Amino acid sequence: MAAEGRSEVSIHTFYAEHYETIDAGGALGTFHRITHRSLERGLRKKKFSRVLEVGANKGEHVQFVRHDFDSYVLSDFRLPAEEIASLNDPRFTYRQADVQHLPFDDNSFDRTVVTCVLHHTSHPGLAASEIRRVTAPGGVMSILLPCDPGLAYRAAWKNSSGRALRKRGVVDPYLVHAEEHPQHFAGLAAHLRAAFAQDSVTVRWWPLPVPTWNLNLYTVWHVVKSQD
């Protein structure tokens, strides 16, 4: 019976039943707002004509974007277009898309925003290559990478999402997390370094300006695609 309970609350139902009130709400919601702002740091005065957001969910990140743009495509593999109809702005469109097989032409976007995606993927190297492929030369890729399974990250998760899931009767929150985050930070960072070897890469660590994933909660990668 316990095994059945664990299988019912998995990655397939986590976002539908728990994400908005646990990960996007309360104290953890405050943390998520910090991560969204981090992705936009230093970009306020710029303009990116064509923007793609990967893993957009219901468009939570849009409110934090301060730079100018002409078009903004929100993509996610699980949600229908009507989920973001409330944006009510003709510059926004929605596309259902898998980051590992993006349905866009090469060099289609001036900026690609990857809010919280790569640790969910089966093939992160392929995903990183796809992100780079659809970004135009000179374009910017902004990627959020949680420092999971670092000590600080796991401690924070245990006392936030983990505790909230247990209160809701989830038998094994760690199994839910393992299904939601199958990729390891060090492996993901290696894939990003390989995919962006020709590009200009800046990595910011939070909350400590020390390049160690055991003491930080997340990193933000800003990558400028080479002109070659």
Image: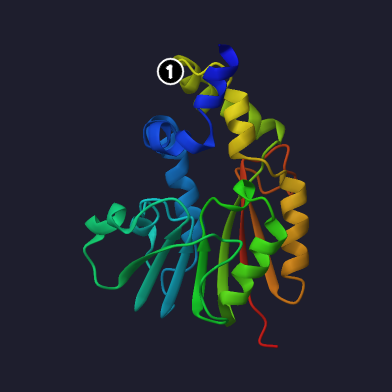
- The image quadrant where one finds the C terminus is bottom right
Query: Looking at the image, which is closer to me, 36 or 205?
Result: 36
Q: Bin the neighbour count of mark 1 within 10 Å (Cα to Cα): few under 14, some 14-19, many 20 and up.
A: few
* Residue type of the residue flagged with mark 1: Arg
Q: Is residue 68 visible?
A: no
Q: Residue at x 24, y 72 (%)?
A: 90
Q: Position of residue 100 (x, y in %)?
A: 61, 61
Q: Is residue 115 visible?
A: yes
Q: Residue at x 69, y 74 (%)?
A: 200
In the rendered image, the residue lying farthest to the bottom is: 228
Q: Quadrant of residue 48?
A: bottom left
Q: Is residue 2 above or below residue 104?
A: above
Instruction: Determine whether, in the image, residue 153 is placed left or right of residue 41.
Output: right
The residue that disc 1 covers is 168
Instruction: Determine whether, in the image, residue 74 is placed left or right of residue 144.
Output: left
- The image quadrant where one finds the N terminus is top right
Q: Position of residue 25 (x, y in %)?
A: 37, 34
Q: Quadrant of residue 130?
A: bottom right
Q: Residue at x 69, y 63 (%)?
A: 126
Q: Position of residue 103 (x, y in %)?
A: 51, 71
